[in-house]
Amino acid sequence: MTDRLTIATWNINSVRLRMPIIEKFLEEEQPDVLCLQETKCPDANFPFAPLRKAGYEHIEINGQKGYHGVATISRLPLTNLEKREFCEMGDSRHIAVDVPFNGGAVRVHNFYVPAGGDEPDRDINPKFGHKLDFFAEMKAWLQGAETAKPAVLVGDLNVAPYEHDVWSHKKLLKVVSHTPLEVDLFENVRKTGGWIDAMRQFTPMEEKLYTWWSYRAKDWSAADKGRRLDHVWVSEALGTNVRGTRIVREARGWEKPSDHAPVIAEFSV
């Protein structure tokens, strides 16, 4: 049956280093599809065996040594693989596949958007310029025919767009990930493509919503200085099928954790 579907997204910050908590997550949550970002692993060294042992036979990867990297693992067949390069940088930051759902398929885009460095000024910080250009390319592509079909876009998009997506709107206005320039570009990509912010569809705007907490805090949970950098967008053609989203916050406190928590989206007919 393909009338129900769960898709999880997680910036794992090294797939080989975090394999124990990936296995724990798969055992406890059992998503149909898990989209990983920042795998930091060349394709030749990707740890297929423990994932297949956990029941995830279908795996597509786009990796590189030491940096970036995305992987989509699934209990369901994956077809129509696409790996798109952005900004002619050679970075492994995107993978797309079709997943069976509702007698047809859902296009699942898995993205790892550049973080953008420290200074929100492209003239002195090329990394910030790269991030802005990356969003411009996303906007040009992810509209029209690409978004007219049932589609999901998940991943670490490295922007916390709204006031309560960060622990302090005022203090972070000049901090990369929450600057007005990034937020405007981010929202432009989303709205131009007709994408729905599934997480905010189920969580009021005045409610805090975080998916990332810095390693720098001695007690990340008590300090709770988080940001929502990880997102789930759905095309309008799939909008009526979203049943909810959930941040698995406790995973941030597991042994040797990523600084991101997983997000799970549920769909049904």
Image (cartoon, helix red, strand yellow):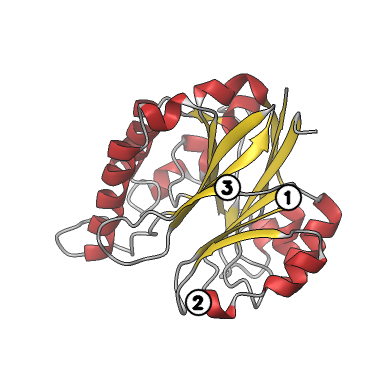
1 vs 3, front mark: 3
Residue drawn at the location 32% of the way across and 50% of the way down: 174
Q: Residue 123, located in which quarter of the rendered image?
A: bottom left
Q: Amino acid at mark 3?
A: Thr
Q: Look at the picture and state if 269 lies above or below 152.
A: above
Q: Look at the picture and state if 240 lies above or below 20.
A: above
In the image, residue 250 lies at what x, y percent?
76, 56
Helix, strand or loop at disc 3? strand
Q: Which mark is residue 248?
A: 1
What residue did someone put label 3 on?
79
In the image, residue 200 lies at what x, y percent?
58, 30
In the image, residue 5 lies at what x, y percent?
72, 37
The residues bearing labels 3 and 2 have C-alpha atoms spaced at a distance of: 22 Å
Q: Amino acid at mark 2?
A: Pro
Q: Nearer the viewer, residue 149 or 187?
A: 149
As drawn, the residue found furthest toward the right would be 28
Helix, strand or loop at disc 2? loop
Res. 163 visible in picture: yes
Residue drawn at the location 74% of the way across and 74% of the way down: 49
Q: Which mark is residue 42?
A: 2
Sequence-earlier tag: 1 or 2 = 2
